[in-house]
């Protein structure tokens, strides 16, 4: 049986820096897999390759037996994979609701002709989709902040919003780039609870994370990356307990 | 009275151009100095059909002009948008210079540097609109429809998509949307507006020549959007009305006619610099 | 032989264009700003030299003065306009518009002061003809242009690769962020680069009108052609820009065999479209 998402032999060189070196791994459906490793290990690069933002020098990405090689980012989303960004990249001058609505697929009047020639239909459709978006925001716990501009949201709320935006796309595999970084204890718990809720609803999550507490609490599997290569794979307990890995990660056992 | 009608009618035609330029420059964020070229294409096409041995009725000619300008904009923006924004600057300058060369040298089609005189007034359903009042009404209708279309687009998902694209294209792609298609659609729409404006211009002035559609004219259009304000309906209306009144104000300053044109263009350039430095949102717009 | 003459003329135009291209390339590769006002600096240089010559100043002195004035002008635009806008977080588009405004201001001041008519340099020796190889005719102005342009190219290449300042500029150009956080201080480098590039562009700015005459709006077409050469040659490659300038000039000249001169802009543009469609990074892209 082939894996849900399979990454094989990825190579990527940036002007002399080997970011990915024969990187291969597979993740199973319905699990929360955490991608860990020291800075520069290539974690965000892998996200960029999987989601079509970067073309690898070599290697393949296969999702549900479909090849993702050479697809554009929007095509990857249509295939069922959506990602967040480490630096959020929300639309600052739009409201939280609008941010989510940008992600909703197959909207009417997302091109000028429908907007001009069928304005009433467009308005009715928008109202419907707006309710969908509100529901998504409620799902991540931002129901009462829906009409706020992003620049007025707290960092924790913005992080929740990035998750809401990928949820809106309807993707079943979510790639989350450091969803918990920079959060206070309370916001951290909210996010972790959200991630587990999403898993229960059938989503598969691949999460880049530095926070070992988060990894321990939510991960089913852990992939340890080092110098662009998969160094180790196992349960959180196995990975965290390994002194050799700790040496690489922290520069000394913890 | 006729003077006021003239001013208002011209301003309304330029409102359509303002909407067009605002779509391209203000909303999509493309630097365009070729708006006047597209305007010119629309004007010459309508003039051609109205002056033909078997003259076409106004609205079909306008339709053809609009379609041609849509195609022109799509053809121009599609390859340029696939590479970086600065390449579009080159493309835009090239289009404008090329268009001026065509308008000036293709004498058979455009009358060359002497232009096309004697363009007949528009006819709506076999009724020619000959009085200034009727022409003003026509242009008011055109401008109003343009404003309505603009308003509808901006409050539709398309408008939101464009605003998001202006903020962060990659994030929009990551949300599963086709950024290129949205930009090209906006450019196509801008072309339609400019083409219609061109048709109205040709029939209102009854004479067109290349000097109305050159680089200086494109700079004027840019200045209208910068001064009026980017990305808003109000800005697209205020800019043209204000900037078209400016030459009248300048005549009060008793500037010798030999340098009047240069002074006008100098003023536009100055306005561009000053507004970018001190008020990038223009009078009634959002920050560029 | 007509085509040989056209080829030699193309070499002359191409060399001059090449200098415009490498000067623009220096600015664009380093500051990432598409400095359209560069066309204004180019034009300003020519008119200043002409004005001085009509006052009786020797040509060489006028040329040097023009170079100095352009250097100052370019540095002023970068430090007072672009740098300020960047400090305020202006977008690329805003800076472009400001640059366009500056160009319009410069061109129209020149048009108002000197009239929009074509002006010729009152320098008799410039139009004296030299005959090469029995059939090819070149004026002294044209010969001077070729010589000075080639000298400028080699000077810039030497500067970029063998001097400390040149290497610093290349470092800033290849990684402005890194330059910001190390001690390279990009903003001061930017002013230096624009100053140097403006100095260089004054040369064709004076020499080309020596041959063809001055026109206030005559800077845009050379600039446009030069930027196309820069892009086709690969941004960051000075040699690419220079070589492609000559290539485009030759193609333009040879096209005169088959079509009228007013359409030469079409040739240039056609080349650009081809590159956009098939090789947007250019032929010799650096990095």
Image (cartoon, rainbow, N blue to C red):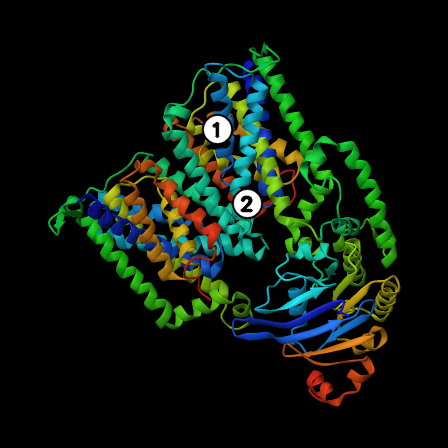
Mark yes or no: residue C112 visible. Answer: yes
Mark yes or no: residue C201 visible. Answer: no
Residue A99 falls left or right of residue B111: right
How many angstroms separate mark 1 from mark 2 (CA)? Answer: 40 Å
Residue found at x 63% / y 61%: A53
The residue marked by circle 1 belongs to what chain? B
Q: Is residue B70 above or below residue B29?
A: above
Q: Can you give x and y, in whole percent of width and height, for residue C130 in the image?
A: 13, 49
Q: Is residue C249 above or below residue B96?
A: below
Q: Quadrant of residue C21?
A: bottom left
Secondary element at image label 2: helix
Residue under numbered circle 2: B78
Residue under numbered circle 1: B250
Residue found at x 39% / y 43%: C220
In the picture, the disc for residue B76 is: none
Q: Can you give x and y, in whole percent of width and height, for residue A229 in the image?
A: 65, 78
Q: Report the label total.
A: 2
Residue found at x 73% / y 72%: A26
Q: Can you give x and y, in whole percent of width and height, for residue C112 in the image?
A: 37, 35
């Amino acid at each position: 049986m082939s894996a849900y998402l399979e990454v094989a032999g990825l190579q990527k060189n940036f002007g002399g820096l080997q970011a990915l070196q024969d990187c291969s791994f597979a993740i199973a459906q319905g699990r929360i897999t955490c991608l860990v490793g020291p800075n520069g290990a290539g974690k965000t690069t892998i996200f960029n390759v999987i989601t079509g933002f970067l073309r690898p020098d070599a290697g393949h990405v296969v999702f549900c037996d479909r090849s993702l090689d050479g697809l554009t980012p929007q095509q990857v989303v249509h295939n069922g994979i959506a990602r967040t960004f480490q630096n959020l990249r929300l639309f600052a001058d739009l409201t939280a609701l609008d941010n989510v609505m940008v992600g909703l697929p197959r909207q009417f009047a997302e091109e000028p002709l429908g907007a001009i020639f069928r304005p009433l239909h467009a308005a009715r459709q928008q109202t419907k989709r707006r309710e969908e978006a509100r529901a998504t925001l409620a799902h991540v716990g931002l129901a009462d902040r829906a009409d706020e501009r992003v620049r007025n949201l707290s960092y924790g709320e913005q992080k929740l919003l990035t998750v809401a935006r990928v949820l809106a796309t309807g993707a079943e595999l979510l790639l989350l780039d450091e969803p918990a970084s920079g959060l206070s204890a309370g916001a951290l718990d909210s996010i972790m609870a959200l991630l587990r809720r999403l898993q229960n609803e059938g989503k598969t999550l691949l999460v880049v994370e530095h926070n070992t507490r988060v990894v321990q609490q939510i991960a089913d599997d852990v992939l340890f990356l080092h110098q662009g290569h998969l160094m180790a794979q196992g349960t959180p307990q196995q990975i965290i307990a390994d002194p050799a890995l700790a040496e690489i990660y922290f520069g000394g056992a913890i | 009275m006729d003077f006021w009608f003239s001013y208002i009618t011209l301003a309304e035609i330029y409102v359509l151009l303002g909407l067009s330029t605002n779509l391209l420059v203000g909303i999509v964020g493309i630097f365009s100095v070729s708006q006047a070229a597209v305007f010119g294409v629309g004007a010459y096409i309508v003039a051609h059909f109205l002056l033909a041995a078997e003259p076409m009725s106004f609205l079909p000619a306008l339709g053809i002009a609009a379609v041609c300008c849509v195609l022109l904009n799509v053809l121009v923006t599609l390859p340029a948008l696939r590479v970086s924004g600065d390449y579009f600057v080159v493309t835009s300058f090239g289009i404008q210079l090329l268009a001026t060369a065509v308008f000036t040298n293709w004498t058979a089609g455009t009358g060359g540097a002497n232009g096309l005189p004697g363009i007949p007034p528009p006819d709506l359903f076999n009724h020619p609109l000959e009085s200034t009042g009727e022409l003003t009404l026509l242009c008011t209708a055109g401008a109003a429809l343009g404003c309505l279309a603009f308003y509808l687009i901006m409050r539709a998902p398309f408008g939101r998509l464009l605003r998001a694209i202006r903020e962060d294209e990659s994030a929009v792609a990551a949300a599963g949307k086709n950024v290129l298609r949205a930009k090209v659609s906006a450019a196509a729409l801008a072309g339609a507006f400019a083409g219609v404006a061109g048709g109205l211009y040709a029939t209102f002035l009854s004479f067109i020549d290349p000097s109305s559609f050159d680089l200086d004219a494109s700079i004027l259009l840019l200045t209208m959007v910068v001064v009026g304000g980017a990305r808003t309906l109000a800005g697209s209306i205020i800019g043209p009305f204000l900037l078209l009144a400016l030459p009248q104000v300048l005549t009060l300053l008793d500037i010798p006619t030999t340098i009047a044109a240069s002074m006008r263009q100098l003023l536009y350039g100055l306005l561009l610099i000053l507004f970018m430095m001190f008020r990038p949102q223009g009078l009634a717009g959002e920050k560029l | 032989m007509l085509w040989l003459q056209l080829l030699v003329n193309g070499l002359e135009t191409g060399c001059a264009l090449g200098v415009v291209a490498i000067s623009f390339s220096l600015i664009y590769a380093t500051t990432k700003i598409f400095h359209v006002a560069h066309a204004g600096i180019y034009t300003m240089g020519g008119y200043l030299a002409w004005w001085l010559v009509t006052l009786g100043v020797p040509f060489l002195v006028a040329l040097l003065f023009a170079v100095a004035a352009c250097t100052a002008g370019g540095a002023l635009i970068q430090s007072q306009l672009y740098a300020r806008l960047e400090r305020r977080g202006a977008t690329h588009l805003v800076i472009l518009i400001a640059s366009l405004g500056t160009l319009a201001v410069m061109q129209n001041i020149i048009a108002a002061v000197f009239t929009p008519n074509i002006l010729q340099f009152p320098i008799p020796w410039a139009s004296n003809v030299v005959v090469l190889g029995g059939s090819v005719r070149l004026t002294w102005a044209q010969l001077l242009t070729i010589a000075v342009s080639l000298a400028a190219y080699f000077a810039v290449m030497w500067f970029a690769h063998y001097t400390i300042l040149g290497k610093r500029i290349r470092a800033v150009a290849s990684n402005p962020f890194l330059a910001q956080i190390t001690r390279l201080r990009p903003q001061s480098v930017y002013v230096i680069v624009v100053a140097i590039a403006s100095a260089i562009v004054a040369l064709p700015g004076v020499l080309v009108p020596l041959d063809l005459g001055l026109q206030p709006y005559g800077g845009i077409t050379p600039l446009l052609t030069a930027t196309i050469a820069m892009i086709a040659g690969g941004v960051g490659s000075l040699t690419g820009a220079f070589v492609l300038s000559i290539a485009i000039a030759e193609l333009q000249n040879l096209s005169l065999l088959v079509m009228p001169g007013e359409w030469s802009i079409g040739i240039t543009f056609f080349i650009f479209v081809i590159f956009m469609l098939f090789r947007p990074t250019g032929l010799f892209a650096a990095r």
